[in-house]
Image: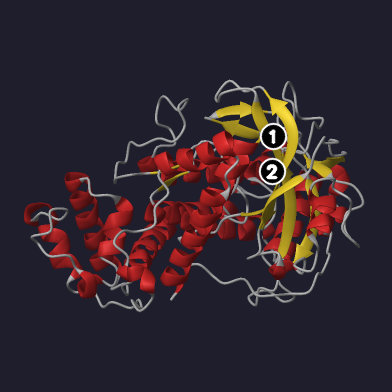
Amino acid sequence: MPITPQAAAYRPDPRIESIRDRLSDPVAAAAFPKTILRFRNRRWDKAVGLDSLSDEQWTAHFGRFEPLPGNLPQPLALRYHGHQFRHYNPDIGDGRGFLFAQLRDGAAEQPGGRLLDLGTKGSGRTPYSRFGDGRLTLKGGVREILATEMLEALGVETSKTFSLIETGEALQRNDEPSPTRSAVMVRLSHGHIRIGTFQRLATLNEPDTMRDLIGYVLTNLYAETPGDAPAAQLLDLVCRRTAALAASYMAAGFVHGVLNSDNINTTGESFDYGPWRFNPTWNPDFTAAYFDQQGLYAFGRQAQAIHWDVVQLALSLRHVAAAEELAPALDAWPAHYERAVAAAICGRLGIAPRGEEADLALLQAMDVALQRSQVGIDRFFFDWRGGGRRAPSPADPHYEAEDFADFRTAIAAYRGTASLDHGYWRDAAPCSMLIDEVEAIWSAIAEADDWGPLYAKVDAIRRMGEALGS
């Protein structure tokens, strides 16, 4: 469930400096005609000690990209390759973004807090822009706010949309009415090292740099001391984290849309939201991207897709480690996922897990019931929160006796652990984020420059997060 960020002082820590020359290129931000602050994450700015910035100072740093004190003197466009819909592409990298700063948060689980990155989207052209303009549509920025806020509230490890500034340019796009408004976004992430970063080093045959990168990720992003087999050590951590990520997508009813290997972070944190969707019903074939014609990244295939990407990491690590060192970690991925998905579903239901066999039976019964009934995913988890304490009546038209008979039997044995005291649980309907509401929120901005529905929705999502966290 969501974790409340802890307030912290501003602590710059640009650790990427030790390997920057081999992983990045210095770049400059575009000069934008306007810098209109549209969103500032007041939940997370205090977690990295930037809550005291005035809006003018905020815009200077995150719209004009004046360096933060003691931080990177110049932005860095990161280099990486990756499989995109299973086709290897060596011609990618940060094409419309860069790493702007690194700093520590107030997390208690790591000494001194976690090392976090401030990275951009829509900040201008880089050596990897190819034919792109390096810009971000305002609609794309609004959609990322909604995705990250909803996922954070539902307990998914996700990047945070830190800032959105409208930039006053008119952009031409093929997938939305044009010209359309432009923006620059800053996201707060637990690292920007991707599986594709390792794939690039493997393709270019740079084992020494790969060893240094393994040490960087272990030391700075996992707070682990590299052992005798650091590649296997890293792969084991990535397997555990990515299995938990895949599981959390299922419990959230979320479809990322583009689970390419360059979009999988080595910390297992979800990021980079393009054609995302929340699944209205438990439909394994539901896709988010109109161009995903084969359903490669469909809702029910996301675990398989992420596992495939992790296999590509293992293949890359073969440049510095023997296969027999790496195999145990990779072989354990399915078991990690099975445990993680049971924990994630039980967590959203607000019940205590009962063990592998019982939890698997519960999940199977839930899968059958939801596919048969086509009840909404958010409605289901809202109504069954706490197990038996909120179990809907068999007479409820959403939960016909035949469809839910096995699920009712299975969940009856579970102990509810969630508090239901929060007012959210007395609402008539759950908080959701389906595509019609996304489009309605954007229409209010596009047609009337009305930002009220967006801000109200963020407040509603965070209220739900409070209820789930309690």
Q: Is residue 345 left or right of residue 232?
A: left
Of residues 196 and 253, the one nearer the viewer is 253
Q: Identity of the amino acid at label 1? A: Ser
Image quadrant for the C terminus?
bottom left
Q: Which residue is mark 2?
A: 198
In x, y percent, where is residue 176?
55, 25
Numbered label tally: 2
Which label sits in the foreground, 2 or 1?
1
In x, y percent, where is residue 77?
80, 40
Under circle 1, the secondary element is strand
Residue displayed at 86% across by 36% down: 31
Q: Is residue 328 visible?
A: no
Under circle 2, the secondary element is helix
Tell me the number on the disc at residue 245: none
In x, y percent, where is residue 174?
58, 20
Residue displayed at 80% across by 64% down: 53
Disc 2 + disc 1, Cβ < 8 Å: no
Q: Which residue is mark 1?
A: 182
Q: Is residue 346 visible?
A: yes
Of residues 115 and 272, the one nearer the viewer is 272
* Quarter assignment of residue 427: bottom left
Q: Earlier in the sequence, mark 2 or mark 1?
A: 1
Of residues 320 and 40, the one nearer the viewer is 40
Q: Residues within 10 Å of mark 2 (few under 14, many from 20)?
A: many
Task: Work out how far the residue at label 2 is from the one at label 1, CA to CA, in angstroms.
Answer: 32 Å
Of residues 149 and 302, the one nearer the viewer is 149
Q: How is the image coloured?
A: secondary structure
* Quarter assignment of residue 200: top right
Image height check: is 185 above or below 391? above
Residue displayed at 54% across by 70% down: 3
Q: Residues within 10 Å of mark 1 (few under 14, many from 20)?
A: many
Q: Identity of the amino acid at label 2? A: Phe
